[in-house]
Amino acid sequence: MQHWGMLNRRKRRHCRKVFEIYPSVNAQLEDIYEPIGKLVVRFQNLELFMNLLLIDLLKQDYDTGFCITSEMSFSRLVASLVTVAEVRIKDVTLVDEMRKVAGLLNTCEGARNKVIHSRYALSNDGKPKRAKITAKQRNGLRKAIHDVTVQEICEHIKEVEVATMQIDALGCKLKARGIISSAYFN
């Protein structure tokens, strides 16, 4: 990383211009930042519930379990929950419930990734836009620019909250039947 003093005069001038412009843009996008942060925190909570449930289904202590689950991607965590549930849970209706929740979990991850891994800016008409740029080996470079609203992000927050409640409810059912022992689900 270059130190400020090492930048040539032209780059320093450009950086100053960007810094002068950015605060006004930042203030205009402020309404979007809070729900994005809320989505991040709610999603972390969802991941915690998923980790605890998987660790309990695996019959591991939390330290050992977190060593395993912390290295998993979200999709691997979801797939592992379903697979382990199919082995540990004998009640077919509970396994089916886990599969349905898994579908919702995958939907939540997609929505979260869309929001978190985007760039936000104002359009010429002053409306907030979300830009998503991806480059994949098979599909090449793709650019998408969409309008974004606080309401849209709040809908994703609600989806994550619903998924969290469903994982919690499933954990409580499994605890009541003696399938998991976690004091966390009560």
Image (cartoon, rainbow, N blue to C red):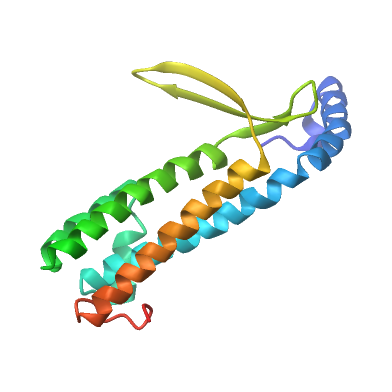
How many numbered marks does the figure carry?
Answer: 0
Give the residue furthest to the front.
Answer: 93
Instruction: Establish if 45 lies above or below 19.
Output: below
- Residue 115 rendering spot, x and y as whole percentages: 56, 40
Q: Position of residue 166 (x, y in %)?
A: 37, 63
Q: Residue at x 11, y 63 (%)?
A: 87
- In this rendering, position of residue 74 left or right of residue 132: left
* Residue found 59% across the figure and 45% down from its top: 153
Quick check: 3 above or below 14?
below
| Residue 104 x %, y % | 36, 50
Question: Residue 19 vs residue 115: left or right?
Answer: right
Residue 179 image point, x, y percent: 19, 76
Specify whether residue 42 is in view: yes
127 sits to left or right of 182: right
Q: Quadrant of the C terminus?
A: bottom left
The reply to whether residue 77 is visible in this rendering is: no
Closest to the observer: 44 or 135? 44
Residue 86, picture quadrant: bottom left
Quadrant housing the N terminus: top right
Residue 50 in the image: above or below residue 107: below
The residue nearer to you, when weighing 158 against 77, is 158
Instruction: Name which residue lies at 45% across and 22% down.
Output: 135
x 56%, y 53%: residue = 40
Vertical comparison of 103 with 146: above or below: below
